[in-house]
Image (cartoon, rainbow, N blue to C red):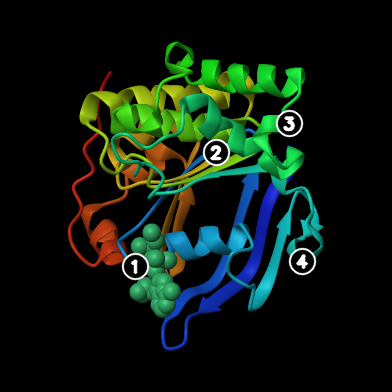
Amino acid sequence: MSESLVSMKNVSYSYETTKALIDINFEIKKGAFIGLVGPNGGGKTTLIKLLLGLAKNQKGSIELFGTKINKFKDWNKIGFVSQKANSFNKGFPATVYEVVSMGLTAKVGYFKFLSKADRRQIETAVNQVGMLDYLHQNIGDLSGGQQQRVFIARSLVSNPELLILDEPTVGVDTENVRKFYDLLHNLNEKQNISLLLVTHDTGTMTHHATDIVCLNKTLHFHGKPTEFTNLSDRELSNIYGHPLNVVTHNH
Ligand SMILES: Nc1ncnc2c1ncn2[C@@H]1O[C@H](COP(=O)(O)OP(=O)(O)O)[C@@H](O)[C@H]1O
Ligand SMILES: [Mg+2]
């Protein structure tokens, strides 16, 4: 049995007037690459906010790496790349190196006091995402896809075991989306980083994910990608409230 990185039991969450999550049971095991899908407003971001401690657990239990979330301290084991990460304007005055170093500031305070080992770690993370040639370029001068890679590097620099990404490919063009998935696949397979990825791209996910989880307030499906693609149109429209066309891409 592989280690449980995340375990949610009977978790419900409401905003003032909206029930966002109802009785969720969900587990992430070490090594998994989970594609979290579902309609807009289905509660995907809320689930992630709960896991990151950004929303307070109201009902049920959440454990991270075997520890109750309110006692959990090893936050550097979890990296997060948000939907809005890729929003630096042209000319934004920080280099790739500086942006990635921010991933270490929790540890070292200010990046001007980085040790040689820290600097090497930054370069390693930038290299992992294939952006070493751009180390001293300004982040604002890069494309959306390149910026998103830099944000991955920023979250990799503290060596997380679990990386959570909330719709990271929004605004990235098709060719770079493909490269982005290849990168994630690589991090998962070669570096054994577990991944939880929120995406609308169910077709591409079926080629990379180990599990698909489909959320619309309740957890409607948790299984293998092939099982998800085999759901009938009727089952999918029940979940989404409208017909969904799952297109599988062949590489
Ligand atoms: N800060 C908030 N205040 C009130 N309602 C919210 C807030 N954030 C999300 N919601 C509501 O909670 C539900 C789930 O939203 P969300 O978790 O963002 O879904 P998803 O990420 O799947 O699109 C939606 O009905 C949304 O309108
Ligand atoms: Mg969302």
Ligand 2: image quarter: bottom left
Q: In terms of sequence position, does the residue under pointer 1 or pointer 2 come before the other?
A: 1
**Residue matched to label 4:** 70
Seen in the picture, residue 142 relative to 84 is either above or below; the reply is: above
Q: Nearer the viewer, residue 206 or 117?
A: 117
Q: In terms of sequence position, does the residue under pointer 2 or pointer 4 come before the other?
A: 4
**Residue matched to label 1:** 41
Q: Residue 195 got which mark?
A: 2
**Is residue 55 shown left or right of residue 67?**
left
Circle nearer the viewer, 3 or 2: 3
Q: Amino acid at mark 1?
A: Gly
Circle nearer the viewer, 3 or 1: 3
Per the image, label 3 sits on a secondary structure element best described as helix
Q: Position of residue 76 (x, y in %)?
A: 71, 43
Q: Indicate yes or no: mark 1 CB to ligand 1 under 8 Å.
A: yes
Q: Amino acid at mark 3?
A: Phe
**Is residue 172 shown left or right of residue 152?**
left
Distance, label 1 to label 4, CA atoms, is 26 Å
Per the image, label 4 sits on a secondary structure element best described as helix
Q: Amino acid at mark 2?
A: Leu
Distance, label 3 to label 1, CA atoms, is 42 Å
| Residue positioned 30% across, 47% down in the render | 200
Q: Residue 113 got which mark?
A: 3
Distance, label 3 to label 4, CA atoms, is 31 Å
Q: Position of residue 204 (x, y in %)?
A: 31, 33
